[in-house]
Amino acid sequence: MATDELVKTTTGIAHHGAGRLPSVEIDSFNIEMKDEDGFLGDRASRGAFRDILERWRKPLRKSGQDPFGKEPTDEISKKTLDDILVGDDVEASAVVHSAIEEFAQELAYVTRRFLKSKAWAKTERIVVGGGFRDSRLGELAIARTEIILRHEELKIEMVPIRHHPDEAGLIGALHLAPSWIFEAHDSILAVDIGGTNIRCGLVETGWKKAKDLTKAKVVKSDLWRHADDEPTREGAVKRLTKMLKGLIAEAEKEGYKLAPFIGIACPGVINADGSIEKGAQNLPGNWESSKFNLPASLLEGIPEIGEHDTAILMHNDGVVQGLSEVPFMQDVDRWGVLTIGTGLGNARFTNRRKDNGKEKDKDKDSETGKKKGKDKKDD
């Protein structure tokens, strides 16, 4: 099948990994920056925080005063760490606070490097998502990072992502879809693929209540921890297809007007034809093979939803998680997302301003128009 034919049959709307979406321009995503110590993302990942916590435990362990006893650092839950922060064990709390401070310094260093890059120039706000954000210690690390950067006179806001990280990657899929879908349907199917889990959801648009999609919510979801089963690539696609069919049945049973659209968040650099160029090494099997195309494979199993041909659009998982924030980023022009998980996902967006249903001309001969035109050129 020719590439252009494949693009048409797997989306029917726009190409996968698109740089322009209905609400935003995607200036960059999945940047892999390096310094003398390796990839920058490795300095601000979930594993990096655990390594820092382990270093702070070592001197106490040697003296037999480790407040965590013999429990391995990797097995201490986020809830346990959160409880320690507000508990009566002062020494344990001090250890966790020390780890948070060091991690915030690392995150500030990484953020500073992003902000100095051409793609992230003039960024006004950064949303922080990923599993690490879903904890008190994560929120403290984010707040401390913003304070560090502001102390250095960098005018940047850093805020935790609003939706739960497990749902943000599903709700964000709404912003992959063209707006006409919302006029006749009240829900879509969304998929969030990770190195450990695959999550599918039935996402209610809430479009009739709020056309900016601020009322969107996940009403049904299904989770499969594929890391426990170690399936083949084909086995993973088969299981994913089954999960989606189950949600289609649920939507019909509950009376939802399900759109014939599936939005997919997937790790890596997504090509226009739905293949994955790189970054999918943690998924089951070889997803970067030129012979594999997830959207095309899903279309074989789900060619229609209702009485209409299925349209599928896939994008990078950091991008999609960031898209869940689109309705709340309308007071700025340029903003980014960092997702702290197994690695550090990243994406930078520029809002597409609209006026009376038409996109504003950024090159208008006015001071505002000149400024925006110049900024766009600088980006």
Image (tube, grey):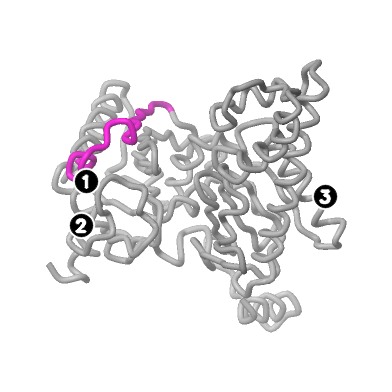
Identity of the residue furthest to the top in this view: 88
Q: Residues within 10 Å of mark 1 (few under 14, many from 20)?
A: some
Asked if the residue under mark 2 is in contact with the one under mark 3, i.e. CB atoms within 8 Å, the reply is no
Q: Quadrant of the N terminus?
A: bottom left
Residue ID for mark 1: 233
In this rendering, would 272 be left or right of 357?
left
Mark 3 lies on a secondary structure that is helix
Q: Amino acid at mark 1?
A: Arg
In the rendered image, is residue 353 in sight?
A: no
In this rendering, would 278 be left or right of 72?
left
Q: Residues within 10 Å of mark 3 (few under 14, many from 20)?
A: some
**Looking at the image, which residue is at 76% across and 23% down?**
65
**Looking at the image, which residue is at 43% across and 46% down?**
173
Residue ID for mark 2: 292
Q: Amino acid at mark 2?
A: Phe
x, y percent for residue 231: 23, 38
Q: Nearer the viewer, residue 60 or 203?
A: 60
Indicate the quadrant where residue 89 lies: top right
- Mark pair 2, 1: CA separation: 9 Å
- Mark pair 3, 1: CA separation: 44 Å
Identify the magenta region.
Answer: 219-237
Mark 1 lies on a secondary structure that is helix
Identity of the residue furthest to the bottom in this view: 365
x, y percent for residue 257: 32, 33
Q: Amino acid at mark 3?
A: Ile
The question of residue 224 being in magenta is answered with yes
Residue ID for mark 3: 147
